[in-house]
Amino acid sequence: MASWWSAVHGYNHPSLNGAATAQLNDMAHVMFGGLTHEPAVELAKNLTTLTPDGLDRVFLADSGSVSVEVALKMARQYWIAKKQPRKQKIIAFEGAYHGDTYGAMSVCDPHNGMHQLFSDCAENTFFCPTPSPNFGQTCKAEDITALEQTLQKYSHEIAAIIIEPIVQGAGGMRFYSADFLSKAKSLSQQYNVLFIADEIATGFGRTGKWFACDHANISPDILCLGKALTGGYMTLAATLCSEEIASTISQSEAGALMHGPTFMGNPLACAVANASIELLKKNQWPEQVKNIEGQLKTGLSNISSIEGVKEVRTFGAIGVVELETPVDMQRIQPFIVKQGVWLRPFGRLLYTMPPYCISTHELHKICEAMKKTCEFHRDTQGKKS
């Protein structure tokens, strides 16, 4: 699981250990309000260079969920600064997952996700159907109709669209059309609504490109990053935006974005993030991810014929088995551990998102464990504990 998809370089990496140790010996933390420091400046330069064009300002915060909170707040404060205070609502998508904090929950799927107990928090969100069709297919008019109709009717109230580009992660592990993503971005421009891309799960190579937005050749107005940002070492997130958004907020009556977490821009985390980005540049991750994708396709190909398996899908360094019925975690988790691997199924999904450095032998072991787990799930359906 790469520690929930973050440890892309594996564990105990000497370069990341060295970066953390060197920074610890220099300065562990200093407030980022009114001050700055070299690791944060270097990281901001790295991120604005790597990310799609037009994302020239960086806000460094604590975690992926917080980066979404910042993005939502940024979008809303932008429209307040533009003297359009009614534009405060958000468009999100069914099957979406954007984090566990309150604002992030408000744009997660309110019915089928892990936050359905708190569905009332989504009162300022318009939900459109899950993006479709599948990756590699052309988006038809009917696929985008609901989004366009929502924008036609409510754009005067809408601050932004938020979407997980190409891959809907913890909400269902779905891979959807790059053409849909491109059309959604075009509609946001047409109806004067900001476009937020949540790349917390997909950023830094997971889908075979630096960022999933690159599959559609789009640049969002706001971009959320986290997870693999520090190679799984430290909690850190970044919210990037355009110069126009940043300057509009900064030149408004408020004078600054109304958000300031204690550990924003933490030097330790920034130093490790810079080292992680350098490792990605050196390690030829595109070839690593391509090899993982090829092996997952081969290794999981014989699972689809197992009774109770609905679909097997792979994309980049992601392998997913969707079952017909939810797994019994009390049974499944110990069974998986006995196979000598660590996977963390949820609902009807059994999946892997391994570190890019995984060996052929290790990945083969994971694929075999997934096959045996599907067979175990089939054989234990309906049996009492």
Image (spheres, grey):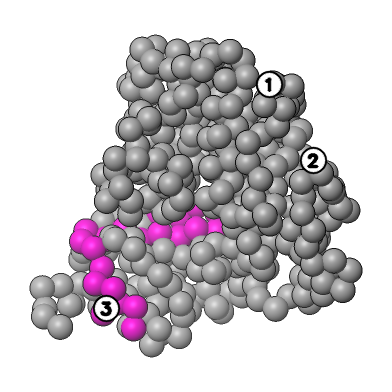
Name the side, left or right, on which 154 lies relative to 55.
Answer: left
**Residue 371 against residue 335 in the figure, above or below:** above
**Residue at which label 1 appears:** 253
Q: Which residue is found at the position 30% from the left and 77% from the top?
A: 332
Check disc 3 and report the residue beneath it. Answer: 330
Question: Residue 316 magenta-drawn?
Answer: yes
- Image position of 309 (left or right of 294): left
Counting residues from the start of the chain, the first of labels 2 and 3 encountered is 2
Can residue 30 be seen here? yes
Circle nearer the viewer, 1 or 2: 1
Specify the amino acid type for callout 3: Gln
Q: How far separated are the C-alphas under marks 1 and 2?
A: 30 Å
Locate residue 129, reporting x and y percent. 32, 32
Return the residue nearer the eye: 251 or 254.
254
Where residue 265 sits in the image (x, y, percent)? 74, 53
**Image quadrant for the C terminus?**
bottom left
Q: Nearer the viewer, residue 326 or 20?
A: 20
Q: Nearer the viewer, residue 253 or 99?
A: 253
Given contact means CB atoms under 8 Å apart, are the residues at marks 1 and 2 in contact?
no
Q: What span is in magenta?
A: 313-334
Against 380, residue 165 (above or below) is above
Amino acid type, residue under disc 2 in the picture: Thr
Residue bearing the label numbered 2:
49
Residue 203 pos. (x, y %): 62, 49
